Amino acid sequence: MRQPLFGLLNVRPLSRSTFRFAAVSLALTLTAAAQAQTQTGTILPGVSQPVARVGAAKPIMGWIRFCQENPAECTVDLSEPATIELTAKDWQTLNRVNQQVNAAIKANTDKDHWGVEDIWDFAEDGYGDCEDYQLLKRRHLVEAGFPRRALRMSVVIDEEGAGHAVMMVRTSRGDLILDNKRNAILPWHKTGDVYIKREGDEGSAWASLGSRTSPTMTANQ
């Protein structure tokens, strides 16, 4: 009499529930691996809609003073693209620079650091606050060949209700956010922030984002 395969192997046949559990575990493992690959730059992010511009806005004073001392950082070169066609190499570079700068700077408020409320610089002494992280990231990305016009300093209200500066990278896959609070680069609508304004890409005036609320923020309220 022929024996079932499980009998020949001297093991008990697996139940349906065991198969289901194994399938679910495999799916979760693959999902986690895909998320990890996305955050480390081996898989490109999905395509999403950019943040809508709703008009012009005034830059903040810290930015104005920074531009007076660093005019090349604030000049908009209209020959550059306003968005970049995101490649796998670009995505890897964005992740590398974001993580390296986040690790290199120690967080410190302008008040504690300089004795003033708001000053923008490149954290050259290794200390800085949110905008300093982003300015240094932009410098490195421009050196790596990214167009400055597509790298926009942005002002948001964060999940704690405080004003916060991030860098918005405008790409063919949507607006991606580099933040000193996390190493993962997220699409704007997944950060949990309220978007107030960003640097303009046509001239010196900033662009109002109309206090656009991230769906993640809405879901958490």
Image: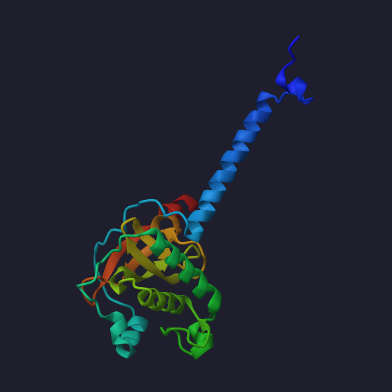
Of the pair 76 and 211, the residue shown nearer to us: 76
Which image quadrant is residue 73 in?
bottom left
Check the picture and name the quadrant holding the N terminus. top right
* Residue sitting at the far right: 10
Q: x%, y% of residue 13? A: 72, 23
* Point 75% across, 15% down: residue: 3
Of the pair 34 and 51, the residue shown nearer to us: 34
- Asked whether residue 194 appears in the rendered view, the answer is no
Position of 72 relative to 40 (above/below): below
Which image quadrant is residue 72 in?
bottom left
Q: x%, y% of residue 122? A: 43, 83
Marker count (numbered)? 0
Of the pair 29 and 205, the residue shown nearer to us: 29
* Point 36% across, 70% down: residue: 154
Query: Does residue 38 appear left or right of residue 17 in this picture?
Result: left
Query: Does residue 165 appear left or right of residue 57 in this picture?
Result: right
- Asked whether residue 130 appears in the rendered view, the answer is yes
Position of 162 relative to 114 (above/below): above
Q: x%, y% of residue 69? A: 33, 90
Q: x%, y% of residue 79? A: 20, 72
* Residue sitting at the far top: 1
